[in-house]
Amino acid sequence: MESLEAGYGAAIGMITFKPIYPALIRGHTSNASTYNFPILFKFVDFSTLNSVITPEPNYSSLPVYIQAAKELEEEGVKAITTNCGYLIFYQEKLSEAVDIPVFTSSLLQVPLVYKLLKKGKKVGIICADSRCLTKKHLECAGIDESIPVAIAGMENSREFWAAIREPMDPVNWKFSGDFKKVEKEVVDVAKKLQRENPDVGAIVCECTELSLYSYAIHKATKLPVFDMVTLVNYIYNAVVKKRYI
């Protein structure tokens, strides 16, 4: 594999929230040990989440993300991602701000996933809050009316939101909640989505928190499951090529 000459050995730069919640667990999108290659992180304040998960475009945090993207580009990464699927609203503006590929959201996979499926199948989307995932978000990801989707959200899942919003124990860096309970909530939402939409052929997890539970979703539904980790791995293998001959 070709050597990386910049980015401190990291080809992927990730703009992520300061680690005050379960990013410390392997499998989370923002945990470096989730990947088989180095990631260069650029942290933004967790408060920006409030301006991101909204039904209407809110660009109040955009300057922060643009600055972070420019810094990552200057530090030599080959592609940039973020850690919230609702940042699809920022996709175009962040892409215009730098000269390397930007992929803000797992939702960018939906058009590809749809093409993989048999005619008549839908793409299931599990998101953090279905009330905030609008047609505008889908359009920003290239999802138009020709791509049938079924959407389910975690908005009524108390343990899930506690895992995101409650701070870590500052001494032991341990979340006080129960991830098994979160997993059950996620699986319940996935199974309900499948039960109400038997024509769903694959699932895309919008929320980056859900990458922790992709295995459980797959096991419960027997469907292919795509998440942000899937996309990060995909892009990495596009910007860092292995030589075979």
Image: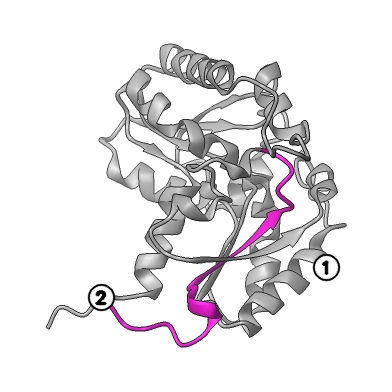
Local secondary structure at mark 2: loop
Query: Where is 217 relative to 72, above or below?
Result: above
Residue 143: x and y in percent read 52, 47
**Count of numbered marks:** 2
Give the residue at x 37% y 17%: 198
Q: Identify residue for label 1.
A: 63
Please state which amino acid type lies under the numbered disc 2.
Lys
Query: Where is 140 relative to 237, above or below?
Result: above
Question: Is 2 colored magenta in this rendering?
Answer: yes
Residue at the extreme right:
60
Compared across the picture, whether 145 is left or right of 171 comes to left
What span is in magenta?
A: 1-21
Residue at the extreme left:
245
For residue 69, which quarter of the picture? bottom right
Question: Is 153 colored magenta in this rendering?
Answer: no
Residue 222: x and y in percent read 30, 23
Please state which amino acid type lies under the numbered disc 1.
Pro
Quarter of the image with the C terminus is: bottom left
Residue 6: x and y in percent read 52, 85
Compared across the picture, whether 119 is left or right of 8 comes to left
Q: Identify residue for label 2.
A: 242
Give the residue at x 47% y 52%: 33
